[in-house]
Amino acid sequence: MKNIIKNITLFIIPLCAMMISCNDDKYDSSDSSDLTYIRNIRILNVADTVIQGKVNELTKEIKFPKLDSLSDLSAVRFAADLPEGAYLDKETYDFSVAEGETQSQLTVTVVNGKRYREYLVTIRLSVPVFGADFTRANVYGHSKATSNMYPDFNGILTRSADMDSAHILIVSRATNLHILNLSDLRQGTVNPVPLDMTGVDGGTYNISSGRFSHGHIYVCNLINSANPPVFKIYHWDNVNAVPTTVFSETVTAVARVGDDLSVNLDENGNGYIYSGTNATYNVMRIKVTGFTNLSEPTIIPMPYGTRLWNYFNLVEGSTNEYLFTKAEIPIRLVDSDGAVKYTMATTSFPLGSADPRIFHYNEKRYFGFITANLGNATCQDNILYIYDITRGATTQEALELLEAGSRIPELKYDLKGAATSSAYPANFNWAISEDAEFLYLFGASPNAGFVFIEAPKAIEYDEFDFLNDDWQ
């Protein structure tokens, strides 16, 4: 008898729990006459047409396609296919989107008799997107991060490289000057194309550093006090041209020049070329007119740092703002004469943040650089960084906001360069594809190799279009 009573008790307890659960359950059950589900839902009064939504009965969520950003969402009216006797709890709903936000969420309730069911409804606005989408970037790596490092970068004799919208320029002290076509790299082909070297001679090294500028190529030699100090810069109209010597000057005021080259020209070929001088730690500035008229070599005092390489890069869109840095000093915003406008904190970015540049793409402003090898255990070698610095009315304000913020990069790519016992330069550059559909990024360094990154233009997409079968 006790066992029977015990078994009856065990049966009654869960049965009561089930009854209590059913009585308290606000949702439908299969034997209820007051059903409260939504089979179909539409927005009636926001656009010129009825906007069809999708319902996920498992999660009790409802979503709609993105709506025009100017839509009036203060009194949204729905039409829904409901069970007999059921109705929505309101005639209209205020889905107004808060300033700075792109969506609004409200709970919409289906009522039928004593029962009701709640759905979380999300309405989103269609807003323009800008910049590049680095999550969809194609990476063509020929660095130590991959198994196919470009052989010219083994060792320290290739200390300069650059990129434009169609080519990569390799300036090696050990091999011939040559280019690689980006179109070949996309196909997985590495096909070095030598540049014409007619008349290129003289110096400690005939070629030392080079840059692209609007399809033109500039390459300098390296001189130091142990050799006849004739500093030369050569110019190619294009990758198939025969070079001309556009600058040849005996330089006695400095011990060494040509370790680096910064070319800052506008579309008409007017501007300045800079090259660091050592061991005075200053910079030589050369005026350029019409791409080929080089004149007025001037030594600019830049008494910062103690290592060889320098970078002096014009801020895109500016006429007299440059980013200047060299090994072991923070990046400075300067004018063409080297006068400092703003100095970034030494703790904001790694010392040795080389070849810094500010540029624009698809309505965004970016700040990028690559860390160089400083020959010590504290340096962060050969990592390419890209930051969004669109905020800020001026270049200085943009940099200040970047430093004051979280400093999370939009893109970070590690070439995994090998540590060395001395400081060696690194190069960074950017370009835009001819159809403007891609932002190109480039980084290179001795003992590391190079990487070419192709990031597509950011486009708006609507995840509503990709909802799975749970959404009816």
Image (tube, grey):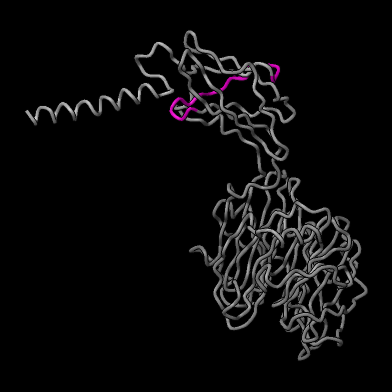
Residue placed at 47% from the left, 12% from the top? 113
The answer to which quarter of the image holds residue 281 is bottom right
Judge whether 201 appears above or below 22 on screen.
Answer: below
- Residue 379 lies left or right of residue 206; in this view the side is left
Left or right of 211, for residue 134:
left
Residue at 40% across / 24% down in the picture? 25
Determine which quarter of the picture holds residue 283: bottom right
Q: Nearer the viewer, residue 412 or 25?
A: 25
Indicate the position of residue 370 as horizontal and vertical percent values: 65, 66
> Does residue 48 appear left or right of residue 20 in this picture?
right
- Majority secondary structure of the magenta segment? loop
The extreme top residue here reads 84
Picture coordinates of residue 248, whole percent (x, y): 86, 77
- The range drawn in magenta is 46-60
Residue visible at 65% across and 39% down in the picture? 459
Q: Is residue 194 visible?
A: yes
- Number of marks in picture: 0
